[in-house]
Structure formats: C-alpha cells, structure tokens
Image: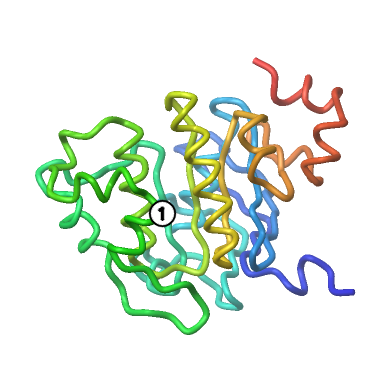
Amino acid sequence: MSSVSDSALLEVDGLNSYYGRAHIIADVALQIRPGEVVALMGRNGAGKSTTMKCIMGIVKIAAGSIQFSKTDISGRSSYQISRLGLAYVPEDRRVFTDLTVLENLEVGRQDQRDDAPSWTPERLFELFPNLGEMRDRPGGQMSGGEQQMLTIARSLMGNPTTILLDEPSEGLAPVIVEQMANTIRELKSEGLTVLLSEQNLHFATLVSDRAYIIEKGRIRYEGTMEALAADEEVRQAYLTV
C-alpha cells in the first residue's frame, strides 16, 4: 500500500516563514491525497491562514518545499500556481462588489483540465441555487454567506483539481454553514481535493477525512477525524478557546 507521501497531490515539507523577525510557520509538513478533504485546524493566530498563503505564493517562504501535482511550486507566483489547478478562497472573500454574479464568475474562468471537473455558470447555479436567483446582482449587494458562495463558485470557474478554503464557516449563520458543508461534500463527490482551515470541530467533522492541528506555527497533531473526535486531551489542548 502506498504511503500518503507516495500518492500525495499536495505535499508541504519543512515549511518555514517569517513576518519580520517573527517565526510564524515552523517546519510545517502536510500531505493530501487526490479526492481527500483535509482540515487544517487550530485557534485564531495558530498559523492556518498563513500556511495557506504560503502554499499559494502570497506569503514568501524562508525554507521548505511545496509540491503540487508533482511540480515544485515553492517560490512561484500566485497566478502561476493557479494555472496549475490550485485554487484559493480567502477568508475575507474579496468579491468584486461592482460586478454582477455572472461577471464575477467570468473573472475566474480558465480552460478545462483533463484531470478536473469542468464548471460552467449553469453548473455552478445548480450547486449554488441562491446564486442562480441573483445572477445579475452586484457582489456588493449580497450577504456574507452569498459572497462566500460566490467566491467559491468563482474559484471553481478555474476548473481546479484542488481548492484551499480559508475558514469557510467563519461568521456564517447556522443554516448557511449546513449549506457550506453540503457544498464541500458535493465537491468531493465530483473528485475535487480540498484543504480547509477551520476552527469549528463540528463543521470539520461533517466534511473532512483527516485533520492536522497547528499551534504557534507548528503541526501538533495528525489523524483521522474519528481519531480526533475520540481524543479529548488533544481537543482540549489545541482547539478549545
């Protein structure tokens, strides 16, 4: 049987990053197989978002390697990484407020890939029915949950093989959180690979196969969601507020 490393679609090894002199990410290593949903968990400020930004080339790395689809993407520009099929949905959404839903989707369009699901606006409106009902509405006139859905949909227009979701349940109403969980499960059924950063253990358990826990920039735990749910000591040490 292959190890995770042998079959990994995304592999981070020995990742280090600094903000000024502050050592923010220290020797982070993680691997994700094709078709997995993996949660990167931890409290606020633990290093979840920074790890994702390092992977996407938004934050400069000081040491370590990042392999995506057997290509070294360490030090590449974000647009180059995106063109390889890796999408990123930031926590702060960043929709184009003056553009309509359809126009926002067109911004994200990339060519179809042989190894990824192919998305069109109509397919995305099936996945996000709310967006289909407001296709001509400007992004600035949408709720936070609707903007979150639009940001994910716009990323999917790039036909990625893998998507990074930064705090997808943060600040959303419970009913929208449930919709978000259903969306992630649907993306998995389409064959998409997902890495999500998350504080909400309930949400992560609904959608994830495995979890990594990061604390003060270091990976402190790796295991299945079932193992994490059964390990109260780890949850108390790294996830409770």
83 or 64, which is in the foreground?
Answer: 83
Residue 187 image position (x, y, % from top left): 52, 58
The answer to whether residue 3 is above or below residue 240 is: below
Whether residue 42 sits left or right of residue 222 in the image: it is left
At a point 23% along the width and 46% down the height, the residue shown is 133
The part of the image, by quadrant, that contains residue 230 is: top right
Quadrant assignment for the C terminus = top right
Residue 127 image position (x, y, % from top left): 41, 54
Whether residue 68 sits left or right of residue 1 in the image: it is left
Residue 208 image position (x, y, % from top left): 67, 46
Residue type for callout 1 = Leu
At a point 45% along the width and 68% down the height, the residue shown is 160
The part of the image, by quadrant, that contains residue 67 is: bottom right
Residue 113 image position (x, y, % from top left): 43, 80
Whether residue 33 sits left or right of residue 86 in the image: it is right
Quadrant assignment for the N terminus = bottom right
- Disc 1 is placed on an element classified as helix
Q: Residue furthest right?
A: 1
The part of the image, by quadrant, that contains residue 26 is: top right
Whether residue 52 sits left or right of residue 237 in the image: it is left
Crowding around mark 1 (Cα neighbors within 10 Å: few <14, some 14 to 19, many 20+) is some
140 or 91, which is in the foreground?
Answer: 140
Q: Residue furthest left?
A: 98
Q: Residue furthest top?
A: 241
Number of numbered callouts drawn: 1
Can you identify the residue that label 1 sits on? 127
At a point 81% along the width and 32% down the height, the residue shown is 229
| Image color mode | rainbow
